[in-house]
Image (cartoon, rainbow, N blue to C red):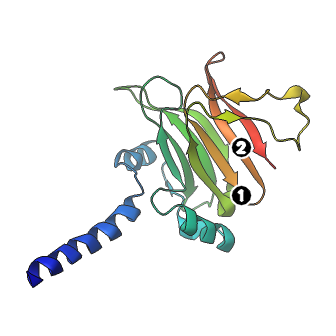
Amino acid sequence: MKRVCLFSLFLALICSVAVPRGNGQSDDIGKLILDDFSGFHVLTVQERDFDTRAFILAHFAKRSPSVVRADFDGDGHLDYAVLLKNKKSGVAKFVILLCPENKHCKKACDEDITSDAGEVFIKAIPMGRHVSQTEAIDTKDYPPPLRLSSAGIEVTYFEKANVVYYWNTKHKKIETIQTRD
């Protein structure tokens, strides 16, 4: 009985170490990065500044703050949003990859975030969520409040701004709305 308890404890310890490390990422993301973004890696928690790192460790225990996998364009297939950093140049990017079934993923967004890499993280916003432009921005030229028709991605620039990237079904492209300043 004592051996069974020790073995169970050992298995629980292994699982608790293995699960957070994976952060829900599939092996596919490594292949995508190697194929399309030579020299880049997924931005790590250790590459964030002190305050952002502390926030991430407190709030992202079971998911990655650098990878989101969801259906962003409503086609029924999972897509990727990823924060990447180049090992040599230090360039950081926010990339959205739309991945149709049995086809190569294509970039729908590729933005340089180098100056904010230490304080940025991403998370999925569920389909059906209402989002609206922050009041800090003049809204006459910006979209009215909207309801997401598919999953969105919220990019948070810690203690600076939040921007939601979403699929515009009418224009068939990814668009943005700044939700917090």
Three-letter amino acid code of the residue under disc 1: Asp
Kind of element beneath mark 2: strand
Three-letter amino acid code of the residue under disc 2: Val
Q: Residues within 10 Å of mark 1 (few under 14, many from 20)?
A: some
Q: Is residue 62 above or below residue 97?
A: below
Would you say 8 lies left or right of 20 here? left
Would you say 28 lies left or right of 156 here? left
Could you say which disc has been placed on residue 142 in the image? none
Dot in front, 1 or 2: 2
Q: Where residue 32 sits: x, y (%)?
A: 42, 43
Which callout, 1 or 2, points at the residue further toward the start of the chain?
Answer: 1
Residue at image mark 1: 116
Q: Residue at x 37, y 46 (%)?
A: 31
Q: Residue at x 65, y 37 (%)?
A: 165
Q: Is residue 30 or residue 161 the one in the foreground?
A: 161
Where residue 135 sits, quadrant-wise, is top right
Residue at image mark 2: 163
Q: Where residue 146 sits: x, y (%)?
A: 71, 27
Would you say 181 lies left or right of 155 here? right
Picture quarter with the N terminus: bottom left
Q: Where residue 23 sits: x, y (%)?
A: 42, 57
Q: Residues within 10 Å of mark 2 (few under 14, many from 20)?
A: many
Would you say 157 lies left or right of 6 here? right
Kind of element beneath mark 1: helix
